[in-house]
Every structure is written in C-alpha cells, then in structure tokens.
Image: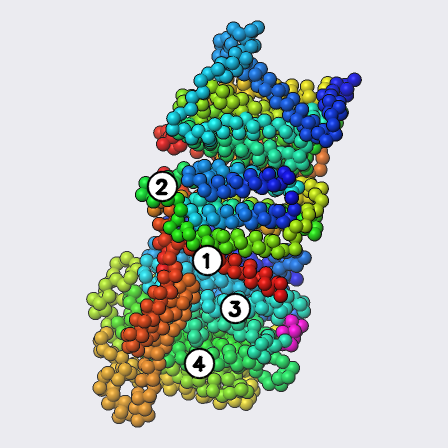
Amino acid sequence: MLFSIFAILTVAGAVAAMSFRNLVHSVLALTFAFAGLAAIYLLLGAQFVGLAQILVYVGAVAILIVFAVLLTRDDGTAPRSILSSSWKESAVVVLLVFGVLAWTISRSLVFGQGGGSLPRDVSMQEIGNALMQRFALPLEIVGALLTVAMIGAVTIAVNEKEERR
Amino acid sequence: MTWIVRNLWLIPALPAVAAGLSSLAKQGQRKFAASLAIGSMGVALVFSLFAFFHVLSSIHSGGPAREVFDFSWLQYGSDSLKLGWMLDPLTAVMLVMISFVGLLIFIYSTGYMAHDENFTRFFCFLSLFAAAMLGVVIANSLLLLFMCWELVGLTSYLLIGFWYQRPAAAAAAKKAFITTRIGDLAFLIGMVWLYSQSGTLLFYDGGAGCMEQSAIAHMVAQSTAAGMMVSTAIALLIFAGAVGKSGQVPLHVWLPDAMEGPTPVSALIHAATMVAAGVFLIARVYPLMSANGEIRAAMSSTTQLQVVTWVGAITAVFAALIAVAQNDIKRILAYSTVSQLGYMMMGLGVGGVAVGMFHLITHAFFKALLFLGAGSVIHGCHDEQDIHRMGGLKKLMPITFATYAIGMLALCGFPLFFSGFWSKDAILHAAQEWSVSRVPFYLGAFGALLTAFYMTRQVCYVFFGESRLSESMRHSNGAGSAPLYERSATPHESPAVMTMPLIILAACAILLGIIGTPAWPWFDRLLNGQPATVDGSRFYEAGVLSVMLLSSAIVFVGLGLGWWFYGRKPIASADAPDAVEELQPQIFRVLRNKFYVDELYQATFLRFNAWLAQVSDWFDRWIWNGAVRAVSYLVLGLSWVARSTDAYVVNRGFDEGCKSARDGGRLLSHMQDGRTQNYLRVVGVAFAVLVVFLIWGGSR
Amino acid sequence: MTSLAGCLLLSAILFAVGLAGALVRRSAILVLIGIELMLNAANLNFIAFWRYGPNPEALTGMMFVIFSIGVAAAEAAVGLALIIFLYRNKRTTDIDRVNSMRG
Amino acid sequence: MGDAADQFFVNLLHRAVGTLPAGLRPILSSLISVVAILSVFAFLFAVTTVLERKGLGRIQNRYGPNRVGPLGFLQPIADGIKSLTKEDIVPHSADRVVHFLAPLVLVFAAFSLYAVLPIGRNMVLADLNAGVLFFFAVSSVMELTIFMAGWSSRNKYSLLGAMRAIAQMISYEVPLILSSVTVVMAAGSLSTVDIVEKQAEYTGFFPHWFVFTPWGFAGFLLFLIAATAESNRSPFDLPEGESEIVAGYYTEYSGFKFALFFLGEYLGLFAISGLGITLFLGGWAAPFSFLTWVPSYLWFFAKLILLIALFIWVRGTLPRLRMDQLMNFAWKFMLPMALLNLVTTAVWHFLAQGVVRWVVCILMIVVAYVLLGRSLMHGSRLEKRVYRFAE
C-alpha cells in the first residue's frame, strides 16, 4: 500500500523532472523523486541507504546541479524546442528498452510471488564492520576516487581569471 | 638473511627519492639537482658493490647463490598478492653495471647538458629512470618487474621527448612509447596467463615460485589449442615484450628514432641499460625459456629458444646492413646497438644465460663509451651530427679520439685485448656448437664482418682526413636546440667532466674482457653460481681456438675493407658522395683493378644493402607505423587500416584504388558523428538485443 | 504490493524515464539528470534483491548501493564540471550543437 | 517520586493511547507526541523572540519590547496577529509555486528534525538507529528550500542571499558532521538515544558527558561555531546581511510566509542546539549524580535555554564576517581541526585509561591549534580588499 503510493510519487517526480522546460523546476522535481526513492528504501528496511540517499542526492547532488544550471545560462540562439533533433528515434529506442525490461520481469520467476517477511533492520555496527572488514578495499578505492574526482572537477571547472589571481 | 638482502630495495629507492626531490627543485637549482642525482647514484653504486661482494663471498663459501625477500603487497579476500626482490649473481652483476655506467653518464651529463635550461628536469628524469631500471633488475616478482618495466618505458618516453619543442623529438617519443606498448601488451597477456597457470608471479618462492620446478612442470604438462605447450606460448608472449623493449626485428623501428633525445640519454637508456632490459628479462625467465617436455627432453633446444635465436640472428645482420648506409653518427651507433642486441638474444638462444649476459655487460660498457664519445664529438662540433661534415678531429680532440677508437675496436671485437672480442667469440662459439642449425653461426660471422666495416667507415669519416666542419658551419646554422654558447669555428676538446668518464669507460672496455676468457671463464661460472679456475688448456678444447681465429680473421677483414674504402685517402669535401656508393669512378677503377670479388661485392651486396635499407625503411614507414597508428586510433581503426593500405597502393602507383579506399575510410568515419545521444541510443538498442538474446539463451 | 516484482517494475519504469530524458532532451544538464535517474533505478534493484534475496545478512546489495552512491556523487561532480567547461568554451549546453568529435 | 515526575508525560501518553482502539494506537500515539512537540517548540519560539529582542536591547543599552502585556511578554502574539493580517505580496515575475512551497518545506523540515531528539528519558519520537544521519539528511533539505526561496522570487538580492547561504551552509556542514562523527565513534552508535544513554553514567558524582574529554571539548567548540553558521546567525549572518543585501533570500517574502521563515530559522537553531546537547552535553542527563531526581526533560530544556542565551549573547557581541573570511575560516581552520579531532578521538579510544591519554590528546589538539593558528596568521598581511564573492 505505502509502497505503491511512494512508487507513484517517485515516478511522477521522475516524469516531471524529465519533462519540465525550466531546468530548475526539473531539478526540484528530481529531488522529489529522490526523496520518494529514499522513502522506498526505508520501507525496504535499508535505513542507512535511504538516509544516505537523502543526504547525498537531495543535499549535495541537487544543489550541485542547481549551481550548474545557474552557471550555464544558454544564449538566446538555442532553438525553442526542448527536444533534441533526433527525438523520434530516441523515443522508439526508449520504448524498446522499456518493453524488453518489462517483458523480462514479467516472465522472470519472481513475478507475482509475494514479498517475504521484513528482516530485522540492520544495525549500524554491522554496516560499519562490513565496510571496515569485508569491503575495506572497495571503500578505500571509492575514497581515492572521490578525491580524484574532486581535484579533477576543480581543475576542469576552475575559472581562468581566478587562476591568474 | 643478511642486511644487504633485506635492504636491497634501498638501491632503487635512493634514485627514486632523488627524482622526487629534484622534481620539486626550481629551474635555477642546477647544482642541487645534479649533486642530488649523482650522490644518490654513487650511494646506490656502493650498495650494489656490497651486494656484489656478498654474492661473491657466498658463492666462494659454497653458500646459496640466490637469496629472495618477499612480502605481501595487498590482501584481497583470502588470497594475497606478493612482491619481492632477490639477490643472485645475475642481479648483482646487472646492479653494478647499471649503477656504475649510470654514475659515469650522470657525471658526463652535467657537462653535456650544461647549457640546457631544463637541467633539473633532465636529472629528475634520469634519476627516475635509474630507479626504475634498478627496480627491474632486483625484482623477484614478474609483476614488480613489469611495473618497473613500464616505468622505464615512461622515462624513456619522457627523455626521448626531452626537447619536446622539436616536432621530430616529440614524434620519436610517441613512436617509441607506442611501439614498445605492442610488445608490452603481449608481455602483459603472458604475465596474466602465467599467473592463471602457476597462481603466483614470484620467480623464486622456495619451490612455489613460477620459475621453479613444480610450476614449470605443470605448465609443460598442458598444451594449448595449437598443440604447443603452455610454457612455450607464455614464453613467446613474454619474449614479445622483450622484442619490443630491446628493439628486435620487427619492433626495432623506434630505437633509431630514439636518438632524437639528448646523447647521454641515448648512451644510458638506448645503448647500455634499458634496451638490454629485454635481454635481461629473457635471462631472468630462462627456466621458462628452456622448459622442455619429457618427450623431447633429449633435444637440447626448445621451440622458444629457437625463436629467440632466429630473431636475434636475423636482427644482428639486418641492423648491421642498415648501419653501413647511415650518415648520422648517432644513427650508426643506434643500428649497431640493435644488431648487438640481436647478438645477445642469439647468445641467450644458443649458449644460455652466461653467454648472452656477458655480451650484454661488455656491450653496455663499450657502447656507452661510443655514445658518450659521439656526444663529445657532437658537442665539440656544435651539434653537427652528419659524419660527412666532420673529419680531422683526431688532432683536435685527442682524448675523444683515443677513447672512441678503443670503443670501436671493442665493438668490432678486435682480438685479445678488447672485451668485445671475448664476448662475441663466446657467442659465435656457442652458435657453432648449436645442435639445431648452423645458419645462425654464419649470420653472426657475417654480422661481425659488417660491424667491423661500418665502424671503420665511421671512424674514418669522423676522425681522419682534414676537417670539413668549417664549411658545414655554413650549412647548418644552429641545428634545432643548439645550446647558445660562443660558437668557435673550430671544434674543441670537451671539458674534463666529459672526458673523464670516457677514459674510465675505455679502461673498462679493455679490462672487462679478462673475466670472460675461455681460460678463466669467471663470469660464466659466476652466473652459474660456482667459483672459477684458471686453466689455459681450455683454449685447446674443441672449436674454441678455431672460432677465435676465424672471428679475429673476420674482424681484420672488416677493418681492412673499411680502411681501404675510407681511410686510405682523405675524403675530399662534405658533399663528396660516399665511397662505396659507387658514384666515384676512381674508387670504381681501384676496386676493379684490385680483384673482381669486389665487383661481385658491389653488384650484389651494396645494391642488396641499399635495396634492403630502402625496403626496411619502407617497412618502417608504412607497415609498422601503420600498425602503431591503427592501435593508437582505436576508434577509427577500420578506416585507418583502409587508409594505410591505400597509402601502400599509392606507393605502388594505383591511384584509383587508393581513392576508393579513402572513400571507404571516410564512409566508415562518418559513423562517428559526435552526437552523444546517438551513441547512447546505440547502447540502448544493443542492451535490448543482448537481454533478449540472453533470455532466449536461458530459456533453451 | 511491496514485492520484489513491484520493485523491479518500479526500477524499470524509472530507468526508462531516465533514459528518455537522456535521449530526448537537448540540454546536457538534463541528460546528466537522466543518467542519475537511471543510476538510482539500478540502486533500487540492488536494494530489492538484497532485501528479498537468499541471505540479507551478507549486506552485499546494500554495500553495493552505498558505493554506487559515492561513485554517483563523484560522477555528478565531474560531469557538471565538464558541462560548465563546455559552456565556457561553446557558450551553450545544447548537445545537438556539441559534435566536434565527429569523424 | 523523581521517577514518577520523570516519566510523567510518558505514562500520560500511554494512558491516553490505552483508551483508544488497538488499531489506531501506534499512529495516534505518534500523532499526539508530534502535536506536543510542535506546540512546545512553537511556544519556545515565541518566548525566545521576546527574550532575544530584550537581551539584545540590554546589550545595546536600550529597552527591548516592553509595551505589549506585562514587560512586553505578549509581544509575539501581537507580531503573530500582525503577520497574519498583513497583505501577502508575491512579486509579479516570481515563480509562484516554488515561491509558495519554499517556506512550507522549510518549516516542515525544521519540525521533522525534532523526531530524533530525545528531550527526556524515553521521550523521543522515533528512535532510529541512524538518528544522527537522519538529522543531517533532513537539515540538508533545508538548504534546498533556501535556494528555492531565493531563486523563485526573481530578485538579485534574494538570489545572492540564497547563494551565500548555500555556500556557507555546505561549507560548514563538513566540520559540523565531522565533529559529530567523533561522538559517533566514541559512542559506537548513530542512535541519539544510545548516545545519551552512554553519557548518562557517572563516576562518583561526575557525569560521562563527552564535553569532559579533550576531543569532546574541541569537538563541542567546533560544533558550536559550525552550528552558528548553519543556522545563519550572527556573526555568520551574511545571507541576510541587512546592510549588504536587503534581507537575503526572504527579501521578497512578506506577511505570514515571512513569519514562517522566521519560525523555520529559530526551529533550526533550537534543533541544532538540541543536537549539540544530545551529542556533547549529555542530552537529558543530569550534570551531577545527586541531581538525577530532577526530571530529565527539565535538564534538556535548561541546557537548551542556556545554549540559546549563549547564541543571543554572541549575536549581540560579535560583528559580521566578510564572505572570504567566512570561507577561509571554514576550509582552512575548521576542517583541519575537525579532521585532527577525529584522529585524536581514535587515539583516545585506543590508549589505555589514565593520565597518559589525557596528556597525549590535549597535546595533540593544542599543538595543532597553535601551529594552525600561527600559520594562518602568518600569511595575513594588510592588503587591498578584494570582493571576490561580491563581484
């Protein structure tokens, strides 16, 4: 019940995000969709992930995108249509992909089987231990990746004027 | 385990630290950078000597010839990846050689690069290279070796392109890097395969290493699809890496171009150490190379060793032939390097580790000597590299001349007094006794002849006759990055900081011969981990003396021919065409008058040579370059293949075919319109297709 | 019906919507948003499989999502930096007009 | 008797819920407590406004509001009526929907922060085992609402204010979270309830609050500074710096929406102070073992009032920073100190009990502080002022 409500909200947010003309609006709609997803995670008993989702996507990524939007005001020469020149073929491809996915799910074994019982929610200790022991190497790699990404983003986007200063 | 073995890592670590520090140095801090690099290299040399004598003592006291130190690098799951270093005679010898030659060349560079504004950068790169090279040598894990191997390649790239303002240098650097990549790719595949087979990349791990009996036997046991033994396949893949790195045919193309780099670099990297890394690699994995199935255990030589031998022999002659026709002083040396590397490979193939390595060591010394001499000549002649425009330097640069002559004689293998003679002789002897075929022996002999010939030619051009430099001053007003200092019209002897290394190296080039004579095969025994004994009677063993006589005869013939062509009468002017390129009637007449073998010689050999030079040049330019490009432009691969082929057709003159091919190329390249969404769309379709395929595959 | 199939369907829909955004719109930023959306759809799948999978104790799916969120943050940062750089050079973020890579 | 008083409200709630049909109980119980929290903190908000104005007045050597009601304590009611009856002006070019949503979402988020604050023993709305994470997640939503407000009202001052606010909040979120992570490490749990439980023990009559450890003290200071910046209060009130940009992101807001923003700000302030209390000052735990008979929620609110008083005092005392000073302070001082504080906490955790670890940790922090301060001071020489963020 709750799930379907959240699902509908999420999809609505996503569709809105994809179809708004004003980019800021679509970013806000996107955050709405992300929030819905987070709610679904909570529903599925993945508390940590849900909250991390809000923290990262709503708190960081959305703001980032908004900044990018404000920093890139498109000049007036852009054609009025928000759709790209080759949107028809793209629509076909999208439908194809979605059809395939839906078909796969529909003929997969899990279809129609009821949900199992909710497992007791995982405590933070478990997650921490898992991160520190079994997944230590991936964790470090992700850390390195983030550092590199930060440096790279700064170097790419740094303004020449500020460089000279 | 003694102190030196545990702390062997210090030897590469020191230059690495030096590189790191001098990379922080400002452009102005020349003294700091130079002293740092030289100091670290000196300490590294001291450590290397420690290691060397440690090995000696342990051998003479009958101790273990090889000691390893392994540590686990990173832990994944239950398994762990181990790295390590080892100290065995091979390592010790290479360590001493590299750090010694390296030290001398560092000192030399302070003089040679004195006028370059990127002095500190140069020394940073040099130290980094030294570190990587020493790392290659001490590595006890194929992975560690590979890392340092790649690092060596990188530094070579950086140093070839050191004068990146010159397009030629930049292009050469790129060429070298990419060409060696081809070999390294094969190497990498071989390494991965080896790991999948033996489960470890340590060479020696107390019986568990991948170069030890169990793993080898396991690899020999299986056989690949083509029916060849897995060990053979892996060995060949690794050998491909060696081919790329040490410029064997067909991947030799980059080495001559690498001479665009500063001369000390050519001496250190592209003559003494790095190009020898390939040979060293083969020597290191020799157990794998000589791994043989029980069935053919009787037969002495394995498939992979035969391949090594043939490639080496062909390279030796091939490069020597090209060298005869060159005019650039450094290119001659480069091609001779290639051919000498061919000798080493051949020696490894026919005679085992000791033979090849002995030639490697001696060659390292005298070829470094030659390059530094050439550098001194170039330096003295204000960056003139064309030997036609030199001459008469014997009087002007006496020290350089003397040392250069020694080096040249050593390279030619002048009997008895020069190290080159003994090492080359060992190779020839082994080749003569090779069970499979005698052809490599003949090729080697022929190569020796050519070597003597072209070296004589070069020396005659450069040092004898009267100077043709004054007029060349008119021709070459400041080649490329000529360092700006007062241009005295007459060439001058180089400063002591450059001549001292020459003298030391010359001494080594003479003395080193002693340790490898048949009478006292100290080096051979050392590598096999046994003390050596003096025994003059070995001279009279089967074939030894005859081969010695034969090779010295060959050398004399070569020298004689060279002298006859070039040294006998001074070359008239810089524009005077080459004596052998039959453009001069009097030389024709002289030759005809002499004996008609020469005419045969003229008609066949020189034409053949010129033609071969052209062909190989053509090969360089179209086939191998085409391959390199194809690799580099992976996205446009198809269209590029079309392009290179159509260029090939253009050479033969079929224009319409070329045009159609080019159109095909353009057509293919049109598939790449830069639209992100088109790519994404293709991905989507592909995904859908894949899913459908998988589902149906699953339902079946 | 909060069952595995439900989650999968939802994630399929989200994926399709994101793909539509990435393919149909002409603004580079919105393409990036679409990609983020697809990523989240994938995350939802992971969570769903972790939750209904054989042993949730292993936490594998959850960990994967945590890492993928981290990677997604990096991806967004770099992507937007690229877009800003692009805008600075071409004064536009219309990817129909950004095809200088055409062969 | 103490226990009864302590658990009074809890039992009350149970009674009230007990009378209801079983199906509705969970929903209704949470509903009741939500209402309770709303009313209590709304009231606190009203009181605080008066107190703040009076306190500031005294600091600036004037009377605060003193006309409406006894000592002017009915002032907030008057303000409320005024803001309700005022005309609600929406700029013509504004983006109406977003302009309308922003204050609502802000207040909603601000209220939902209290869900994880244990305001007394067994008095927490939702004992999530990722409570702290929840707090930060929701507070990160507030940044977005501020952006919505600033962007939607199509006014350059609003946009500037919003940008400043977001930049500032993001920059100070990092040290804020890092300094809280120290506590999480020490307590070994993300659940606010557990954290308070950990601190509610006593050696002798002395409590185990985390402030009373070197890293805890440093962490608390960092937390306080970062919290001041997070809630946009002076000296970090650049986003609504009246003298520079009219009123920052709510320049274009009037009437009730403005009041909502005001409410949201103060609620955020209370919430973050409450978090500080929970993390460092032992939540509802009594300061001394012999004072445990006093009901726990009283302690919580006492500490809350104290912190608010501190904030008011700071506001009355310190001048406003410049934007670049703000950023430098965040990234060059707060962040390194917070990171070092993490390390110190780990050291503290792994060293054996006793004098040694005190000495070591204190040394680590003090030395780092001195060195960092020296180096930052060293660079700063008088030079022409560059409005890097104003251009």
The quadrant of the rendering that contains the N terminus of chain A is top right
Q: Secondary structure at mark 3?
A: helix
D186 part of magenta stretch: no
Q: Is B679 drawn above or below residue A148 in the view shown? A: below
Q: Residues within 10 Å of mark 2 (few under 14, many from 20)?
A: some
User: Residue B261 in the image: x percent, y percent?
Assistant: 37, 63
In-image side of D145 versus B66 (left or right): left
Q: Provide the residue span drawn in magenta.
A: B212-221
User: Residue B492 in the image: x percent, y percent?
Assistant: 29, 65
Please tell me which of labels 1 and 4 falls first in the chain: 4
Q: Cβ–Cβ below 8 Å for labels 3 and 1? A: no
Q: Which mark is residue B314?
A: 4
Q: Which mark is residue B682?
A: 1
Q: Which residue is mark 2?
A: A74
Q: Kindly identify the amino acid type of the residue bearing the numbered disc 2.
A: Asp
- Kindly identify which chain the residue marked by label 2 belongs to: A
